[in-house]
Amino acid sequence: MTKRFCRGLTGLLATALLTISVAVAEQTLGPVTDEIGVIRIPKGAPIQIGGSWVLSGPDTASGLDQKRAVEIAIKQLGGKLLDHPLKLNAEDDLCNAEGGQTVGTKLASNPQTVIVLGSACSSAATPEAPILWQAGIVDICTSCTAPSLTAPNRKPEYAGFARTVYSDIEQGKADATYAREEMKAKSVVTIHDGSPYAQQLQQVMADNFKAMGGAVLSQEAIAPTDVDMHPLLTRIASEKPDLIYFPVFTAAGAQILRQAKETPGLEHTGLLGGGALFSADFIEAAGPAVIGFLVAYPDLSPEAMGKGYPDFVEEYKKAYGEAPISGNHGNAYDAAILATKAIEQVAKSDAAGNLYIGKKALRDTVFATKFDGISGPIACDPYGECGEFHPSVLEYTSADPKTFAIGKNPKKIWPK
Amino acid sequence: MSLLAAARLPRFPAASRIDAVGIALWGLRIAVVLVVVIGTIGSLIKARYTGAQWFDLVMFGLTIGSIYAQIALGYTMVYGVLRMINFAHGEIVMSGAFAGYFVATAFDHSGLLTQSPLPTMAAVVAVAVLTSTSIALLAERIAYRPFRRSGGLAPLICAFGVSFFLQQTFRGMFGTAVRSYPDPLWQRAAFHIFGYTVPHLDVLVVGLALLFMLALYLIVQRTRMGTAMRAVAEDAEAAALMGIDINKIVVFTFALGGAMAGIAGVFYSMVYKQVYFFMGFTPGLKAFGAAVLGGIGSIPGAMLGGFFLGMVESVGPSLFLDGLGIPAPYQLRDLIAFTLLIMVLIFRPQGIFGERMAKRRA
């Protein structure tokens, strides 16, 4: 009860701080008055939606998959909303802090940016969301899962941040459960790459693993650009862990996987990766070592997803000539639907056909909108956590990147 | 042998000029030495690693060190002859790795890489060397030569430009994905000696790297072209007056550096099994550090610097930091490698094999 009260109180305080966390400037334009500003879209001009994803580098599949999902959502709306064309301004945030900062600044500098979808990475979203909210722009993240982004104690500058994807609080707990109960691991070594995603996820996993009676032998760190993992893995081998848990990104993850198999002393050590290793790109980078590798990821089987998901997958195949190339497309599609539903509710037209959108009103509407998405029910809590989580563990079955197909390669092995 | 005799600098500041900075530097030296000594004693007392694991760490260090050394040779030769830091050298390594990747993949798909490893790997190396050398020569002719007489930072900025140009060209041509290098069974084989496991690939890479470096050393030391290179490195104007064609020597230097870069690119890909457009940057930077450590301009110095850096990266965290109880020591491996590099340069600013400049020129 006390906990709930405190959470509610913190929520209220956060809402109160909302108005002072952005450049407060009440504005009236046309029929709309808003506490933090109004966007005027002239008749016939597009409603501009910003996109921020990783569109180059080793993790491209993740960002491209989400961008495609948003494009499908826009296409399904006929490319229009409230008689205005919808325009997606997708930018490459490189899945790092510098990229997120640059993209955030670029999108925030466009006065016509109504809302931003993405990023795919917590590393980029962490600096990007405050920049956007400083300009009164809501950011609906599509696959950044770091717990700090929607934590009750998050800073006021994140008040405009929401996400249609789960928090790694849940992912880390599920991974620890799988490691302890299914893999029967008694000891674990975790590896992170210093990114908010990897660092926070391995910490949550380690905390839960310990709480379940397991031993965390060490929590190692690498740089995302490291290629020589042999010395680190030799050090880990000296600890004789049952499991190495490494929720890192494609390039470093592939090196750990390959080199762990060559390291004396790790022949019988289990390996478990995180969601960033769920793509055809990872198969390409890891080569034959990928066969048998386990990756923890939300359950994307039709029974765990929303009812519109199979139709979406067909639409995706038709549009791009291939099945989804990574895993968070459902979250991205739902983010686009959430954004357009909120815009529809908030926007007002004048007699000349110009459209007006209040920024604060849009933020509040995004946080209040509920619907059944293709990734599951969407309903935001006061801190912007809107998605639902169903855990699963998948196993890669082939080293051919062309065989990447969710449910087949990798195939779901848990829950059975 | 030294291509460049480094600047005339005293080994130690004169005793009469002891000041606060000097005291701080000595304090730093003592602190680093204490960390190394206490850490090493602590690690050895802890006995966390078995003999076999120490042996593995040393082998990993030698392997990556031999690759750094080969790359460092490119930096050091170009600097020796042109007094220019070719920051695009890492990308020339990357270009060789890409060329080798395509040939190796084709052989792998046809099964030849497994059936006939020797001729196929020779072909892979030959194509990589050809590609790297061609790109190095093109860079010299198109980008660097026009700046040769320019003073200031123009050649350095030009080298950065070439580096970005090559990265983005390969990115545009081959995409941004990380590609997996073929991994035939023979590359994963190992033999056992005195209870230690020695991977064939590590021995092959270290052995061939030493062989190629020895060949390069002999070319520079014992051939007419090598002698001319050294003459140009010592005093280009005097060498020109003696009838040496400077352009020819510069081209020869870039060709040698490019060839070593191609070989290093293939070895790097064989060991770490990944190829992508940005792969040359980090090893290039580290190899540059190795060249400076050894004494930029000195071929043996570049070799020694490469091996030193590789060993410190590989063994250093376990040897120095584990004993001090520092958690996750491998995240600090670049830090300790470059701290030791700085320490060596504080003690010997011209690098390990750097020499004083000739007092009188011809």
Image (spheres, rainbow, N blue to C red):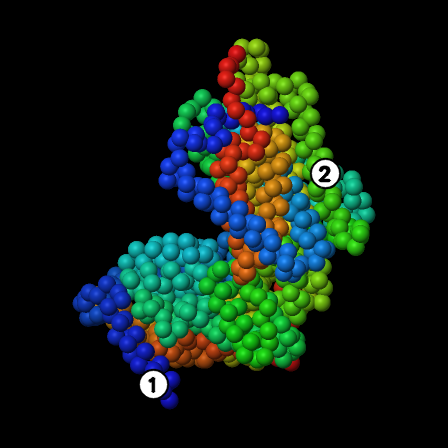
Task: Give the answer, above or below, for where B60 lies relative to B210.
Answer: below
For this orientation, the residue located farthest to the front is: B16
Judge from the rendering whether residue B343 lies leftward or rightward of residue A101; answer left or right. right
Query: What residue appears at the point 28 percent right and 58 percent down from the top-left corner?
Result: A111
How packed is label 1: few (under 14 Cα within 10 Å), some, or many (20 or more)? Answer: few
Task: Give the answer, above or below, for where A25 lies relative to B314.
Answer: below
Q: Where in the figure is residue B126, as x and y percent of width and height?
A: 70, 36
* Quarter of the rendering occupied by the N terminus of chain B: top right
Judge from the rendering whether residue A298 lies leftward or rightward of residue A162; answer left or right. right
SS assignment at label 2:
helix
Given residues A244 and A280, the one toward you in this image is: A244
Q: Where in the figure is residue A255, as x and y percent of width and height?
A: 62, 56
Judge from the rendering whether residue A8 lies leftward or rightward of residue A298; answer left or right. left
Query: What residue appears at the point 40 percent right and 72 percent down from the top-left corner?
Result: A150
For this orientation, the residue located farthest to the top is: B242
Given residues A85 and A296, the one toward you in this image is: A296
Name the disc covering residue B208, or none: 2
Q: Chain of mark 2?
A: B
Q: Chain of mark 1?
A: A
Query: What residue appears at the point 38 percent right and 53 percent down from the top-left corner?
Result: A102
Task: Give the answer, above or below, for where A14 lies relative to A127.
Answer: below
Query: Mark 1 is on which residue type?
Result: Phe
Q: Which residue is mark 1?
A: A5
Query: Can the viewer see residue B261 in this picture?
Result: no
Q: Where in the figure is residue A43, as x and y percent of width and height?
A: 26, 62
Given residues B342 and A369, the one toward you in this image is: B342
Query: Mark 2 is on which residue type?
Result: Leu
